[in-house]
Amino acid sequence: MSEHVALPGKLGDPDRTLRTDPRADSRMVAALEPLDLAGAPKPVPLSANATAEEIYEYTAKIEPGFEMLLDLIHADLPAVEGVESRTEVISGVDGNDVNLYIHQPTSSSGGLRPCILHIHGGGMVILAASGASYVRWRGELAALDLVVVGVEFRNAGGALGPYPFPAGLNDCTSALEWVHAHRAELGVSKIIVSGESGGGNLTLATTLKASREGRLHMIDGVYAQCPYISGAYGDPPMELTSLHENDGYFLSSEMMDYMVRAYDPGQENLTNPLAWPLNASVEDLKGLPPHVISVNELDPLRDEGLAYFRKLVKAGVSVSSRTVNGTCHAGDVILRGAIPEVYAASARDLTTFAHTC
């Protein structure tokens, strides 16, 4: 007689939360508890028929709370040493100004360094590259002997919005072109495009756009973390099992569906790979530079990242994947103080890829 095997996450218990999931890293849960992020998420105060204006008002209201939470998470960390930073303002392809935040080691290595073009998270709708979490991540990477350039792209909502698709993607493309044109000035040997969550979306979309438009020679590698790329959150397909298994763990499909509607108000780009890269065909992916797809075990977005990885394999792209066990969405990037070994492992993996791709 075979033993009963309990299904993971909410597949096994619809009331399960990060607090009660036995797979969750206890250090992560302890860090999220005082922020009220370890239990069930609060319902989104919008109706199914919410207007674009109501959704934009909602994103404007929630953004300060997310920024405050990220500030609190990083409040007691020591300063990153051996790194200098500056801001460069460039003109985007749409004629708008784009801030680039450049972090470099203060010591001179006498040679060229890889550059990480970093694209921050927030569902392409909220948050800013100037936020504490992203300043920290760029600084820590620069301390590992990298040049890191953060892109302050236009958001589809919040303080830097509302500029729906493809505004943010255009800004990331402008940043890529500028970094490539200034490789010598920056002391850059190669360019790796990288980002997490919504930044993972824009990382992959920037690469797909470069492939379509003859810009692929500018990108030497791609490292996408917990990419938010399906757009299928209103009615999640069962083949993306983690959207059911981990729904409400830090992120909920309900909230992400409203983010989709902010990013593409007319819902005309739900199958456009430049808006939602999981829609890219195997043919679209052929000839792309080396990739890493990193996902989090307890993330609703885990399986869409892995599905993209499998498409890259079929396309013959040099690619690897990694799953950061015990962590929620982007937990290995934002929870520096709570799980420093996990954070360091992800930073180290990105750095190794940057130096060897």
Image (spheres, rainbow, N blue to C red):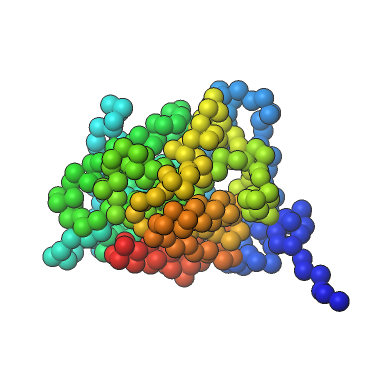
Quadrant hosting residue 127 = top left
Seen from the viewer's position, the closer of residues 6 and 319 is 319
* Quadrant of the drawing holding the C terminus: bottom left
Report x, y in % for residue 40.
Answer: 70, 50
Q: Is residue 273 visible?
A: yes
Report x, y in % for residue 243.
Answer: 64, 49
Tell me if residue 313 comes above or below residue 95 in the rendering: below
Report x, y in % for residue 273.
Answer: 47, 39
Seen from the viewer's position, the closer of residues 60 and 13 is 13
Quadrant hosting residue 172 = top left
Quadrant hosting residue 161 = top left
Residue at (54% x, 34% y) in the render: 270
Q: Is residue 153 visible?
A: no
Q: How many marks?
A: 0
Report x, y in % for residue 129.
Answer: 38, 44
* Quadrant of the drawing holding the N terminus: bottom right
Seen from the viewer's position, the closer of residues 250 and 308 is 308
Q: Residue furthest right?
A: 1
Horizontal side of residue 104 vs 70, given as left or right: left
Tell me if residue 207 comes above or below residue 90 in the rendering: below
Horizontal side of residue 293 vs 185, given as left or right: right
Residue at (46% x, 29% y) in the render: 164
Residue at (74% x, 62% y) in the render: 7
Horizontal side of residue 34 vs 73, given as left or right: right
Q: Residue furthest bottom?
A: 1
Horizontal side of residue 128 vs 241, given as left or right: left
Residue at (53% x, 27% y) in the render: 268
